[in-house]
Image (cartoon, grey):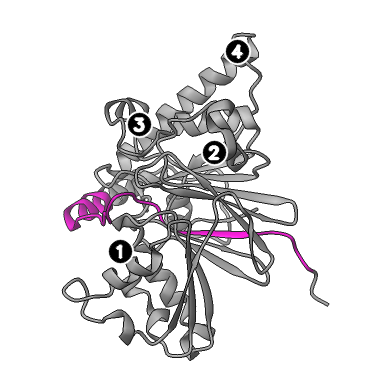
């Protein structure tokens, strides 16, 4: 008999903010040349994994920004359990997810999908017209948002001249649902609760729970409310969390220069995570103008900040802080909670 598990599986299908940012051919060419040059200059490894070739060993030893990068698709995250799946946002990453889903019931018109939206800025919608399950008769697509105008958004999106196929011509049947702020809803065995983020129009984050485990999805947010008192009724979004996916579009300096732009820096997420005892943080929503090298530099700056904050707390210079596992996320990343 198959053993039941309380784990949630998370896959990140898009990590960029604002608009898709594929690497230009000349950048890919330069990156490839550097990799090949470094491979030629490599030193022989002290120990060799018999399951890996020299090329695989070399690539695995290199930092991400020098090899595969972080990805260029905009936000889409898939959260699944043994019995259910919830998709968050319809950025350009949802196109690739759609192709994967077409290999299962969705490809036969037998699929039922739940997609919840944080808000309706373009980078969180742009992949929907290219989400293959929408075009298969028999599929049921349930879409959810706290905002009341979700049906109107779909009517605008699937309309000429914006897209040649109008809403009424889609093969799948769409169902529209409005979520209530801070009220939990069950999606199979996944409990989802919306909490407000600090972003124009507005935007809602989600706390997703199963079997005593919790994921917090906090994209997009400027995190203008940081203290427990300021967060008020939205504080639970950051409490009792095993993994938090957090907006880090800017460096700390850039976030100070771009007030009211609706995005944060990794340092703000680290402050909350260390205070609230969040076990793991994944930073996403990378600026489309940032090269992979710049993202890696922002990660290095966040590391310096993290070490300084822990040292200050450990020397009695501040409130007690919890250590946190954290890193900058990339497209295709799979996590378990």
| Residue at mark 3 | 251
212 relative to 194 in the view: left or right: right
In depth, the one of 284 and 229 nearer the eye is: 229
Label whose residue precedes the other's in the sequence (3 or 1): 1
> Was residue 38 drawn as part of the magenta stretch in this picture?
no
* Magenta-span inclusion, residue 23: yes
Q: Which disc number belongs to residue 126?
A: 1
Nearer the camera: disc 3 or disc 1:
1
Q: Give the mark nearer the N terminus: 2 vs 4.
A: 4
In percent of width and height, residue 261 lies at 30, 37
Tag 2 residue: 326
Please report contact status of discs 4 and 1: CB closer than 8 Å, yes or no.
Answer: no
Question: Eyeballing the image, is 42 above or below 337?
Answer: above
Magenta part of the protein: which range? 4-33
| Residue 240 x/y as whole percent | 68, 41
Q: Residue at x 26, y 54 (%)?
A: 21
Spot the residue most to the top: 316
Tell me the number on the disc at residue 318. Answer: 4
Gap in Å between the C-alphas at discs 1 and 2?
A: 28 Å
Which of the two labelled residues, at mark 4 and mark 1, occupies the earlier sequence position? Answer: 1
**Residue drawn at (32%, 74%), measured in percent from left and top?**
130
Q: CA distance from mark 4 to mark 1?
A: 44 Å
């Amino acid at each position: 008999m198959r053993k039941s598990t309380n784990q949630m599986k998370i896959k990140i299908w898009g990590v960029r903010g604002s608009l898709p940012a594929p690497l230009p051919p000349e950048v890919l060419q330069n990156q490839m040349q550097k990799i090949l040059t470094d491979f030629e200059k490599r030193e022989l490894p002290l120990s060799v994994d018999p399951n890996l070739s020299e090329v695989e060993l070399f690539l695995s030893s290199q930092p991400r920004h020098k090899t595969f990068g972080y990805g260029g698709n905009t936000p889409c995250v898939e959260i699944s359990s043994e019995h259910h799946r919830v998709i968050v946002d319809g950025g350009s990453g949802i196109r690739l997810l759609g192709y994967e889903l077409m290999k299962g019931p969705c490809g036969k018109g037998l699929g039922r999908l739940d997609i919840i939206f944080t808000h309706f800025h373009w980078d969180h919608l742009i992949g929907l017209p290219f989400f293959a399950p929408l075009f298969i008769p028999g599929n049921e697509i349930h879409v959810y948002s706290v905002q009341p105008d979700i049906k109107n958004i779909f009517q605008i999106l699937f309309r000429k001249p914006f897209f040649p196929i109008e809403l009424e011509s889609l093969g799948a049947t769409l169902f529209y649902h409005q979520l209530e702020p801070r009220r939990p809803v069950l999606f199979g065995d996944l409990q989802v609760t919306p909490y407000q983020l600090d972003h124009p129009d507005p935007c809602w984050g989600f706390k997703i729970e199963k079997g005593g485990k919790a994921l917090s999805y906090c994209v997009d947010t400027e995190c203008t409310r940081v203290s427990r008192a300021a967060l008020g009724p939205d504080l639970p979004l950051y409490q009792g969390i095993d993994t938090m996916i957090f907006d880090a579009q800017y460096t700390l300096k850039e976030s100070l220069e771009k007030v009211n732009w609706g995005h944060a820096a990794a340092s703000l997420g680290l402050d909350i995570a260390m205070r609230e005892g969040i076990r793991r943080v994944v930073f996403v929503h990378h600026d489309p103008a940032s090269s992979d090298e710049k993202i890696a530099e922002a990660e290095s700056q966040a590391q310096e900040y993290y070490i300084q904050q822990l040292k200050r707390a450990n020397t009695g210079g501040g409130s007690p802080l919890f250590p946190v596992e954290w890193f900058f996320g990339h497209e295709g990343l799979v996590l378990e909670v």
